[in-house]
Image (spheres, rainbow, N blue to C red):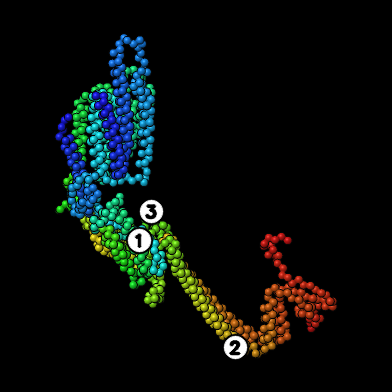
């Protein structure tokens, strides 16, 4: 019986080795991250199974040794001079003791370190941004890991039951790891099934979960090592292997979880919760049924599909379109369950849009003002032509024969060109092209580029903008119809087309110059008005002055003539007197305010110096406050 | 162990699903499938539906999208016939037409479609450079009435690539091709910006100097008119002065009655006018009336 148990242990180890190698190869081939992590668990299980098998051999050797010695002791009863029970004469026992005293703790310590290191490096490896997470061959992964699950489950259950029946503590660890690895393989296979159904990152998440489990086993090993130091030794009692993991045992036999939970509830509440009708009915008996019912309901829920407003659905049965029901309108619909029927949804009634030319930047889009001189998007420049002047065009035509046409001037424009469209023929949209939205965007971009390289920049930014938008819409529609896209182009907008930010200020300067020109002209007109008005006034003044002088002259002349007429008789009455009188009157009147010097001495030769400078009058000095 | 019907049913259902997943596969309307048995192509399916297979590793199924694939090549720089640097990218719509040729060529790659597109990109790049090199820039960019040869250039590239594809027997065909982007290199872009700036500067300067010119003309006109006005006014004033002199001259005849007296009176008036403002006069004692300082005439003291 013991040899059978040893054989069982060896078989467990060999199977784990084979499964580990095969699992590694398959996981690498299909790029299954969870598969690779599960191989680490298989490797740990292999080590544990190998050590426990070796320990079983040592115990078997010890048992045989004791049996032989007992036989020898019965044959030599009373003939020996000295009887000794020294353990030095039991080498197998000594080997076993030393193995358990030294090797097992060291092995468990190394196992703990290995588990922790594996968990750390695997987690770091899974966290790499460049890690490829797509499963290449989901079906291969499903086939292999589900098959391995069944194999390991059967063998593990056999070993576990045998260990329980034979009460062999050394077969338990290997059996527990067999069962744990079986469930892990099922989890990996389940992840591959989810990937096959469209959940592309399921395998990655399962791998992450297994890393966490590996870390927990490392923690448990460490705790066990620490507790082992303080555990009291009872002589004669078989010790539990230090490398046997209770966590692995619990996870390997899930029904043990229920039992453990029941015991924990009983202990916590102080009475036998596990024996109440509620617990027995819903946890022990109905749990499996409830889980299965949930799976069944989940499966049957795939028979109903709800198409939202604004959507349409394409129904395929085993890849074919269903006759008469290929197009599903908004509302609830029944269909065959997965994986037979699939529904692919598309937004058909909604107006969809994309933008050509620029990548809008969210931070800059918050501004309410869009200026040519301030970048509001990441600019993408389009080539646009400039219409040559007629003379240059003639020159180009004349030179065309010689092949030396002048290179036309090109300019650049930038701007966001929104294109709005609506899906009108869903089957054409879905089945004619692999990526219809991308194709429509390519067609639209091509039409925009083609239009702009043949248009004049100044026209398209001014008078030709509206017409250009309509022409573009028609061209894009024609191109889409030619490719049988099944879409209707609703509108194309050119409102944001403008010169690049770098040259936009120069466009604004032209407007400034135009206004500056008008300002100068208006200033000149104002000057003209002023000049003319002043000249007119001055001219009028000159004429008025002349008229006034004329009247004055005429009046004076008449007055003087009249005066003279009256002076003649007076003169005739006393000519000399009249003359003197007139002279003296004139002298007195004219010299009244003048400074007069009268030289009375005539017989001397005096030199008189006259200060002819004008002096400031005293009253002026007084007025300005200057003191004498 | 209790044989709960629901558990049995669920287990049976899961088993059926696993068997379906392992022993069947679906081919969609948009797909074409190739089945290999131990590596050798054994079947190909172009019609949609549920198909049977033997699980891996005996048979493997390869599915390819048979719709038109959309692919855009990289933007590459080339020269036009007149030596103009141009950066262009094209997009193509291609699809698998002969899966028996396509599969052996690309099935060994982890991503056959992407590998096919890489090969296609090489052909496109070569054809694009060749075709653009045969055309001047004016065939591509021109606002004049004759337009551009945009479509012809696209057709030339398409033709070149299709010819090459047929020769290579990749099992794919190009449905359509279009020029998606046309750009110029960054260094040339700066030169284009300078030209655009200069063009705007010409317009701005034109406006500025036109304004100055017109302003000068207006000012000159205004001054001319003002000058004319002033001249006319001066002329009128002179004429009026002349008329006044003529009228005043009529009065001079009166003075002919006693010319000496008239001259004396005029002299006295002039003297009076000229000595009005701050004059300084130096008289000798003989000048009347200052001769009185030398004494009065005895004749005047003894009147008879």
For the point 37% across and 45% down, the residue is A129
Please state the chain letter of the residue tagged with numbered disc 1 in the rendered image.
Answer: B
Can residue A77 be seen in this snapshot? yes
Q: Position of residue A425 (x, y in %)?
A: 22, 57
Q: Is residue B91 positioned above or below A185 on the image?
A: below
- Residue B125 is marked as 1
Mark 2 to mark 3 CA distance (whole Å)? 98 Å
Please state the chain letter of the residue tagged with numbered disc 2 in the rendered image.
Answer: B
For the point 24% across and 23% down, the residue is A272
Q: Position of residue A273 (x, y in %)?
A: 24, 24
Can residue A227 be seen in this snapshot? no
Badge 2 or badge 1: first in the primary sequence: 1
Q: Secondary structure at mark 1?
A: helix
Circle 2 or circle 1, nearest the eye: 1
- Residue B250 is marked as 2
Q: Which residue is mark 3?
A: A361
For the point 35% across and 66% down, the residue is B131
Residue closest to the eye, A103 or A91? A91
Mark 3 to mark 1 CA distance (whole Å)? 32 Å
Residue closest to the eye, A412 or A524? A412
Q: Secondary structure at mark 3?
A: loop
Q: Are marks 2 and 1 in contact (CB under 8 Å)?
A: no
Horizontal relation, residue A338 to residue B148: left or right: left
Q: Secondary structure at mark 2?
A: helix
Residue closest to the eye, A278 or A560? A278
Q: Is residue A327 positioned above or below A180 on the image?
A: below
Q: Position of residue B87 (x, y in %)?
A: 38, 62
């Amino acid at each position: 019986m013991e040899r059978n148990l040893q054989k069982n242990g060896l078989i467990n180890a060999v199977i784990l080795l084979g499964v580990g190698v095969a699992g590694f190869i398959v996981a690498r081939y299909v790029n299954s991250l969870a598969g690779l992590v599960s191989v680490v668990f298989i490797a740990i299980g292999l080590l544990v199974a190998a050590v426990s098998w070796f320990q079983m051999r040592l115990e078997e050797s010890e048992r045989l040794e004791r049996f032989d010695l007992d036989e020898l002791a019965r044959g030599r009863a009373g003939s020996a001079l000295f009887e000794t029970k020294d353990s030095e004469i039991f080498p197998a026992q000594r080997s076993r003791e030393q193995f358990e005293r030294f090797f097992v703790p060291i092995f468990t310590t190394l196992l703990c370190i290995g588990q922790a290191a594996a968990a750390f490096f695997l987690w770091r490896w899974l966290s790499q941004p460049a890690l490829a997470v797509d499963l290449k061959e989901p079906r291969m992964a499903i086939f292999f890991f589900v098959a391995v699950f069944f194999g390991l489950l059967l063998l593990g259950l056999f070993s576990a039951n045998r260990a329980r029946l034979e009460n062999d503590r050394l077969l338990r660890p290997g059996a527990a790891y067999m069962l744990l690895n079986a469930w892990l393989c099922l989890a990996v296979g389940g992840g591959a099934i989810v990937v096959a159904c469209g959940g592309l990152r399921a395998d990655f998440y399962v791998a992450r979960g297994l890393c966490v489990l590996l870390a927990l086993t490392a923690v448990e090993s460490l705790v066990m090592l620490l507790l082992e130091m303080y555990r009291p030794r009872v002589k004669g009692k078989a010790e539990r292997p230090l490398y046997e993991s209770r966590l692995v045992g619990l996870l390997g036999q899930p029904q043990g979880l229920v039992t453990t939970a029941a015991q924990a509830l009983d202990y916590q509440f102080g009475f036998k919760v596990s024996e109440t009708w509620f617990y027995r009915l819903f946890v022990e008996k109905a749990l499996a049924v409830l889980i299965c019912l949930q799976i069944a309901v989940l499966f049957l829920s795939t028979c109903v599909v709800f198409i939202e407003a604004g959507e349409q659905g394409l129904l395929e049965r085993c890849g074919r379109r269903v006759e008469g029901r290929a197009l599903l309108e908004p509302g609830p619909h029944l269909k065959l369950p997965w994986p037979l029927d699939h529904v692919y949804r598309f937004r058909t009634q909604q107006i969809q849009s994309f933008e050509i030319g620029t990548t809008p930047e969210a931070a800059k889009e918050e501004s309410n003002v869009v200026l040519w001189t301030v970048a509001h998007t990441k600019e993408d420049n389009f080539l646009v032509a400039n219409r040559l002047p007629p003379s240059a065009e003639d020159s180009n035509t004349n030179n065309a024969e010689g092949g030396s046409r002048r290179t036309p001037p090109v300019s650049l424009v930038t701007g966001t060109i929104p294109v709005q469209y609506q899906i009108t023929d869903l089957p054409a949209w879905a089945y004619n092209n692999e990526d219809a939205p991308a194709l429509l965007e390519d067609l639209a971009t091509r039409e925009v580029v083609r239009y702009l390289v043949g248009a004049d920049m100044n026209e398209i930014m001014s008078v030709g903008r509206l017409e250009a938008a309509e022409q573009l819409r028609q061209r894009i529609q024609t191109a889409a119809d030619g490719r049988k896209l099944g879409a209707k182009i609703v509108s194309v907008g050119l409102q944001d087309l403008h010169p690049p930010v770098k040259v936009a200020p120069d466009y604004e300067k032209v407007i400034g110059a135009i206004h500056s020109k008008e300002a100068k002209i208006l200033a000149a007109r104002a000057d003209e008005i002023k000049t003319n008005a002043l000249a007119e006034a001055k001219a009028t003044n000159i004429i008025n002055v002349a008229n006034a002088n004329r009247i004055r002259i005429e009046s004076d002349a008449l007055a003087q003539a009249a005066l003279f007429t009256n002076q003649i008789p007076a003169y005739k009455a006393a000519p000399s007197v009249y003359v003197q009188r007139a002279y003296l009157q004139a002298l007195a009147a004219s010299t009244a305010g003048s400074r007069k010097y009268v030289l009375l001495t005539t017989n001397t030769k005096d030199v008189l110096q006259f200060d002819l400078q004008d002096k400031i009058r005293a009253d002026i000095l007084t007025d300005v406050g200057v003191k004498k | 162990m209790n044989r709960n019907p629901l558990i049995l049913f669920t287990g049976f259902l899961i088993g059926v699903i696993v068997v379906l997943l392992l022993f069947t596969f679906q081919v969609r309307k948009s797909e074409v499938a190739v089945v290999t048995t131990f590596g050798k192509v054994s079947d190909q399916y172009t019609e949609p539906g549920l198909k049977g297979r033997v699980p891996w590793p005996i048979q493997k199924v390869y599915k390819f999208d048979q719709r038109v694939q959309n692919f855009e090549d990289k933007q590459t720089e080339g020269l036009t016939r007149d030596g103009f640097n141009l950066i262009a990218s094209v997009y193509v719509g291609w699809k698998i037409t002969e899966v028996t040729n396509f599969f052996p060529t690309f099935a060994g790659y982890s991503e056959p479609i992407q590998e096919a597109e890489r090969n296609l990109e090489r052909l496109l790049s070569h054809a694009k450079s060749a075709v653009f090199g045969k055309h001047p820039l004016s065939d591509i960019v021109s606002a004049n009435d004759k337009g551009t040869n945009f479509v012809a250039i696209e057709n030339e590239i398409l033709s070149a690539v299709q010819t090459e594809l047929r020769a290579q027997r990749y099992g794919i065909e190009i449905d359509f091709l279009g020029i998606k982007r046309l750009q110029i290199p960054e260094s040339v872009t700066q030169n284009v910006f300078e030209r655009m700036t200069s063009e705007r500067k010409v317009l701005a300067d034109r406006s500025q100097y036109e304004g100055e010119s017109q302003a000068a003309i207006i000012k000159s006109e205004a001054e001319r008119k003002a000058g004319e006005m002033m001249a006319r006014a001066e002329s009128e004033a002179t004429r009026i002065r002349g008329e006044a002199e003529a009228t005043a001259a009529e009065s001079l005849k009166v003075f002919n009655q006693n010319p000496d007296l008239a001259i004396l009176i005029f002299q006295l008036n002039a003297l009076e006018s000229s000595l009005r403002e701050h004059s300084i006069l130096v008289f000798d004692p003989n000048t009347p009336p200052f001769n009185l300082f030398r004494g009065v005439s005895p004749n005047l003291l003894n009147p008879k």
